[in-house]
Image (tube, rainbow, N blue to C red):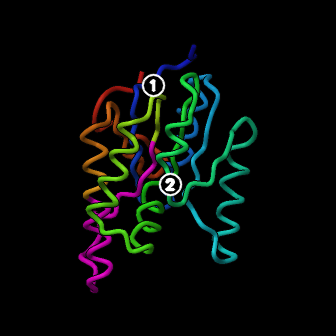
Amino acid sequence: MSDFPLPALTLVLGGAASGKSAFAERLVVQTGRPRVYLATAQAYDAEMVAKVAAHQSQRGVGWHTIEAPHDIATPLANAAANQIVLLDCATLWLSNALLANVPATDAVNNFVNAIAARTTPLVIVSNEVGAGIVPENALARAFRNAQGGLNQAVAARADLVVNVIAGLPMVLKGRLE
């Protein structure tokens, strides 16, 4: 089935502009499976429109893209067993949930339940937001804590966890074959 086997659940972490998305895309392409891209970003300004276009161009052809800014459970449940899904990214999905007034604990539980119910290999991209200073305001601290909790919950369930820094992957859990 695949040229390059990946485990059932892979988490790719990194800071902003670390190369995590490009790395995750390469992992998915190397499997040789039909690819589904769950896009969680919402483009509300010209900068984000350009970022989304750059990501699409970087990915190239061969991807079935599903816009999933709020509901990841349905597309994950509908993915065919022979496909592989790339969810990019959990951080924007969490931001969308919190901006929709979903309590952080509920958002994390919803995400974990959705990924647990899937039947196809899944690669999740997420930002590591805990390496900086303590944010000065309560909203930013609450987001950082929620993101840290989401990353920890996914990492606990993942078979492979990779942190990407300056485009270089560092395996934290599991093995890159």
172 within the magenta span: no
Asked whether, in this view, residue 89 is left or right of residue 52, the answer is left
Asked whether, in this view, residue 25 is left or right of residue 165, the answer is right
Residue beneath disc 1:
6
Going from the N terminus, do you reach mark 1 or mark 2 first? Answer: 1
The quadrant of the image that shows the C terminus is top left
Residue type of the residue flagged with mark 2: Asp
Residue pictured at 30% horizontal, 28% vertical: 174
Residues drawn in magenta: 124-148
Graded by Cα atoms within 10 Å as few (under 14), some (14 to 19) or many (20 or more), the crowding at tag 2 reads some
Task: Give the answer, above or below, for where 169 lies relative to 29.
Answer: below
The image position of residue 72, as x and y in percent, is 49, 50
Task: Give the answer, above or below, for where 60 lies relative to 135.
Answer: above
On residue 144, the disc is none
Residue beneath disc 2:
71
Graded by Cα atoms within 10 Å as few (under 14), some (14 to 19) or many (20 or more), the crowding at tag 1 reads many
The image position of residue 140, as x and y in percent, is 32, 78
